[in-house]
Amino acid sequence: MAKKLAIIASKGTLDWAYPPFILASTAAALDYEVQIFFTFYGLTLLKKELDAKISPLGNPAMPMPVPMPNLVQMLPGMESMATMMMKQKMKDKGVASLEELRSLCQEADVKVIACQMTVDLFDFKKEDFIDGIEFGGAATFFEFASEADVSLFI
């Protein structure tokens, strides 16, 4: 019987988007049965138009080319610049894009559940999301998570 990995993805920024997809695809490659429950801001990672950004503000561990005070980090355009720099660094290092990792998870039969309550809360429409996902509530996920060998909240 396959081991099971249950992940709750609750963040939608670029730096928080990678862990659920990397861990899920790796576990699937190791023959785990995997489910990811996307809720609140993590739900945006399932939208057709993926636009995850990263902010240097309030992220003191983020390596910057030069030390930058918080005042500078909050200037208009800094989030876009940090996002562009991070995406370029990932590309230069051969790190897969979020879209590629998301597709890899789907190809590996990772079950992806979009939180229906969050869909309703933010007035999203089902057609806003990629194909091949399931919509359900917490109970849908708990059924699987209660039997999981590993459960992660990201």
Image (cartoon, rainbow, N blue to C red):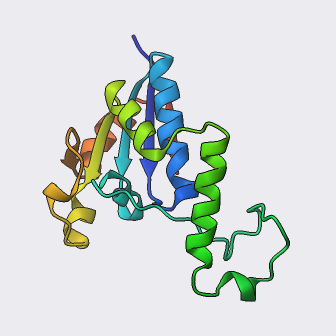
The percent coordinates of residue 12 (x first, y second) are 45, 60
At which x and y percent is residue 122? 25, 72
- State whether residue 150 is above or below residue 86: above
Residue visible at 15% across and 56% down? 126
Residue drawn at x 77%, y 62% is: 61
Q: Quadrant of residue 82?
A: bottom right
Relative vertical location of residue 22 with respect to residue 78 in this rendering, above or below: above
- Residue at 58% across, 64% down: 83
Residue at 84% over, 70% down: 66
Q: Quadrant of the N terminus?
A: top left
Q: Is residue 59 visible?
A: yes
Rendering coords of residue 18 (x, y %): 53, 47
> Is residue 149 at all visible to an observer of this figure?
no
Q: Is residue 131 left or right of residue 58?
A: left
Quadrant in which residue 85 is drawn: bottom right
Q: Give the vertical position of 48 relative to 2 (above or below).
A: below
87 is higher (above) or lower (below) than 131: below
Quadrant of the image occupied by residue 134? top left
Choose between 139 and 104: the one closer to the eye: 104
**In the image: residue 34, left or right of residue 112:** right
